[in-house]
Image (cartoon, helix red, strand yellow):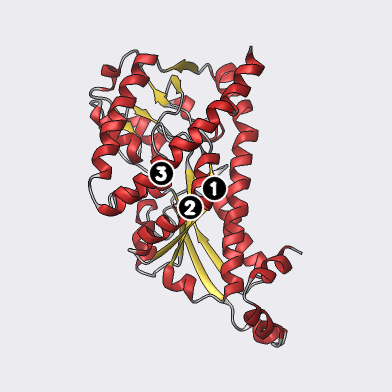
């Protein structure tokens, strides 16, 4: 039934043409799609969801798209995924776009912005207020087509082996934090070390880094980060909503007939909602286990720390927006919508949570 629904959305001419072909003829048109990822294989949440999405594309297309999935390091290194797909050696990657801000600073807006929009708000911008068109324009400069395929929700603030009582405690800290959050703590005096997820635990154990953020309780518990770090801070000011994306080589995507393009879009959209729901369902129990069974020390960043990080964020984003016209265009659209949606949230979610907690 799902597949029939997808096919109805395709062009009528394509649907008629497909209907006139015998099943063997349709099967002979199958496409190969190699998908690489920045996540470890079989890793709860991120890794398994990527594997599930790749398999679902083949399933929904009834084999007309045959996907082959490679986790980080199995075909290329995690941070080599972008170049591998741009070159056409693979047809798609599953990752987080802020890994590629060195390719274009504007990519950071399509994962998460410090003190920015939540995942629900971000999705509204992408779907209804011009975000996807801007994403297409920027990704298109590299010959790519990007689709949202997952969301972690609001993250935690990170793992530390010392308490963070003031913003000066970031000075000299070697911390893993990608995206714009990394630029903010760099402004606070930290040394930012960008590493893929599969290397984080060893880096903490050897002292290559002495603080890190990953995702939130569900993924952090599975990684066993509590074995190498003592303090777990919140809120996740740097990632109020972490987006994951399925990005496809644009030539490969355009070569698909309309019905198969729609199947890829729909598989990504379902994954986008599925992963967010999965994290929401698992985080509380995982946090309870971290605190109750592994003696993790839960800490809240002091208001003074948050205030200074917000100040540094404003400076970093102002500089980013001025760096090139495309980044300015994305920033203007993003910030304008955030202003509007925040005003609504003040009257809706914020007031609701205050009401039920009083």
Q: Residues within 10 Å of mark 1 (few under 14, many from 20)?
A: many
Labels 2 and 1: the sequence-earlier one = 1
Q: Residues within 10 Å of mark 3 (few under 14, many from 20)?
A: many
| Quarter-of-image position of residue 314 | top left
Q: Is residue 18 left or right of residue 303?
A: right
Quarter of the image that includes the N terminus: bottom right
Element assignment for label 1: strand
Q: Position of residue 223 (x, y in %)?
A: 50, 35
Q: Give how far apart the Cα atoms at labels 2 and 1 are.
A: 7 Å
Quarter of the image that includes the C terminus: top right
Q: Residues within 10 Å of mark 2 (few under 14, many from 20)?
A: many
| Quarter-of-image position of residue 136 | bottom left
Which residue shows up at 57% across the image and 42% down it?
Answer: 45
- Say if residue 117 shows up in the picture: no
Res. 245 mark: 2
Foreground residue, 220 or 304? 304
Element assignment for label 2: strand
Q: Is residue 288 above or below residue 29?
A: above
The residue tagged 3 is 334
Res. 150 mark: 1
Name the mark nearer the viewer: 3 or 2: 3
Labels 3 and 2: the sequence-earlier one = 2
Q: Give how far apart the Cα atoms at labels 3 and 2 are.
A: 18 Å
Please report contact status of discs 3 and 1: CB closer than 8 Å, yes or no. Answer: no
Foreground residue, 357 or 169? 357
Q: Position of residue 281 (x, y in %)?
A: 65, 34
Q: Give how far apart the Cα atoms at labels 3 and 1 are.
A: 19 Å
Please report contact status of discs 2 and 1: CB closer than 8 Å, yes or no. Answer: yes
Q: Is residue 319 above or below residue 32?
A: above
Q: Is residue 278 above or below residue 310?
A: below
């Amino acid at each position: 039934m799902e597949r029939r629904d997808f096919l109805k959305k395709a062009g009528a001419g394509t649907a008629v043409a497909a209907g006139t072909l015998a099943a063997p003829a349709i099967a002979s048109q199958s496409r190969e799609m190699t998908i690489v990822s920045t996540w470890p294989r079989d890793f709860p949440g991120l890794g398994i969801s990527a594997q599930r999405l790749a398999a679902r594309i083949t399933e929904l297309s009834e084999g007309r798209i045959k996907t082959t999935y490679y986790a980080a390091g199995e075909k290329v290194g995690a941070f080599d995924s972008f170049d591998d797909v741009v070159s056409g050696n693979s047809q798609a990657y599953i990752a987080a776009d802020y890994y590629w801000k060195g390719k274009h600073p504007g990519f950071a807006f399509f994962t998460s912005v410090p003190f920015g929009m939540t995942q629900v708000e971000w999705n509204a911008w992408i779907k209804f207020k011009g975000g996807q068109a801007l994403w297409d324009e920027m990704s298109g400069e590299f010959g790519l087509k990007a689709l949202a395929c997952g969301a972690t929700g609001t993250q935690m603030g990170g793992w530390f082996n010392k308490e963070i009582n003031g913003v000066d405690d970031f000075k000299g800290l070697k911390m893993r934090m990608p995206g714009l959050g990394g630029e903010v703590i760099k402004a606070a005096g930290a040394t930012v070390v960008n590493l893929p997820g599969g290397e984080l635990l060893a880096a903490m154990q050897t002292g290559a880094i002495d603080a890190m953020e990953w995702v939130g309780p569900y993924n952090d518990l599975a990684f066993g980060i509590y074995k190498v770090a003592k303090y777990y801070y919140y809120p996740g000011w740097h990632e109020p909503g972490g987006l994951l994306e399925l990005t496809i080589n644009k030539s490969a995507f355009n070569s698909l007939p309309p019905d198969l393009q729609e199947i890829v879009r729909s598989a990504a959209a379902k994954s986008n909602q599925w992963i967010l729901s999965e994290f929401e369902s698992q985080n509380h129990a995982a946090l309870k286990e971290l605190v109750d069974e592994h003696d993790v020390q839960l800490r809240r960043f002091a208001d003074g720390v948050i205030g200074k990080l917000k100040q540094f964020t404003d400076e970093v984003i102002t500089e980013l927006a001025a760096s090139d016209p495309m980044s300015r265009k994305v920033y203007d659209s993003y910030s304008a919508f955030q202003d509007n949606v925040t005003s609504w949230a003040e009257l809706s979610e914020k007031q609701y949570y205050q009401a039920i907690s009083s």
